[in-house]
Amino acid sequence: DDDDDDDGSAGHTHTNYKSYVSEDALNCLHCLPQAHSAVDKLRYCVLFLEKISDFFSGIDNAGAMGADSLLKMVCQHILMAKVYAINAQVTFLEEFARDEQLLRGREGYALVTLQAALHYLNSSNNFEADIFSNDD
């Protein structure tokens, strides 16, 4: 009953990372440019991380996800989403999300996580080795 291999063109070509990516998380990232306020953008950032966490906790029964694993998954999702001017989106949040109460909770964690992921991606010279390799 596992004969569904026919829809992938040539064997390994179907290893195009989609199985490692949450479509719901990608959708949250795609909403960032349409959100006009820092509060709305931060809400999508929080949802983005929650969707990644939900997706991977459903796949992997290895327990709680570590910060390094989360950062790698966030990087993978950012690359796959191809959000227009993602750096500008996060810079907007850095400039306009000034509410200390807001930035202490989940929103602050989401912003710092995105900042770290973008910093890592912007300094990477080899996404394949740095972000998509399985050796942790």
Image (spheres, rainbow, N blue to C red):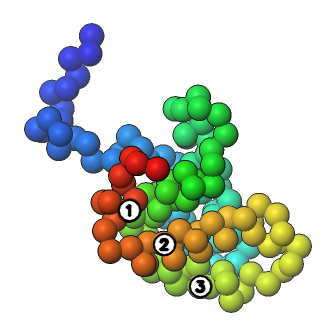
Q: Position of residue 110 (x, y in %)?
A: 67, 64
Residue receiving disc 3: 91
Going by the image, does 44 lie left or right of 7? Answer: right
Q: Position of residue 76 (x, y in %)?
A: 43, 58
- Which circle's residue, 1 or 3, is located before the other in the chain? 3
Going by the image, does 56 lie left or right of 135? Answer: right
- Up-down: is 86 above or below 59? below
Q: CA distance from mark 3 to mark 2?
A: 15 Å
Number of marks present in the image shown? 3
Label 3: state its secondary structure.
helix
Q: Are marks 2 and 1 in contact (CB under 8 Å)?
A: yes
Question: Residue flagged by tag 2: what amino acid is it?
Answer: Tyr
Q: Nearer the viewer, residue 134 or 108?
A: 134
The crowd level at tag 2 (other Cα within 10 Å; few <14, some 14-19, many 20+) is: some
Question: Residue flagged by tag 1: what amino acid is it?
Answer: Asp
Q: Residue at x 38, y 62 (%)?
A: 130
3 or 2: mark nearer the eye: 2
- Which circle's residue, 3 or 2, is located before the other in the chain? 3
Q: Residue furthest top?
A: 1
Hey, which quadrant is residue 90 in on the image? Answer: bottom right
Residue receiving disc 2: 120
Q: Nearer the viewer, residue 131 or 44?
A: 131
Q: CA distance from mark 2 to mark 1?
A: 9 Å
Q: Nearer the viewer, residue 106 or 62?
A: 62
**Tag of residue 63:** none
Residue receiving disc 1: 130
- Which circle's residue, 2 or 1, is located before the other in the chain? 2
Hey, which quadrant is residue 91 in on the image? Answer: bottom right
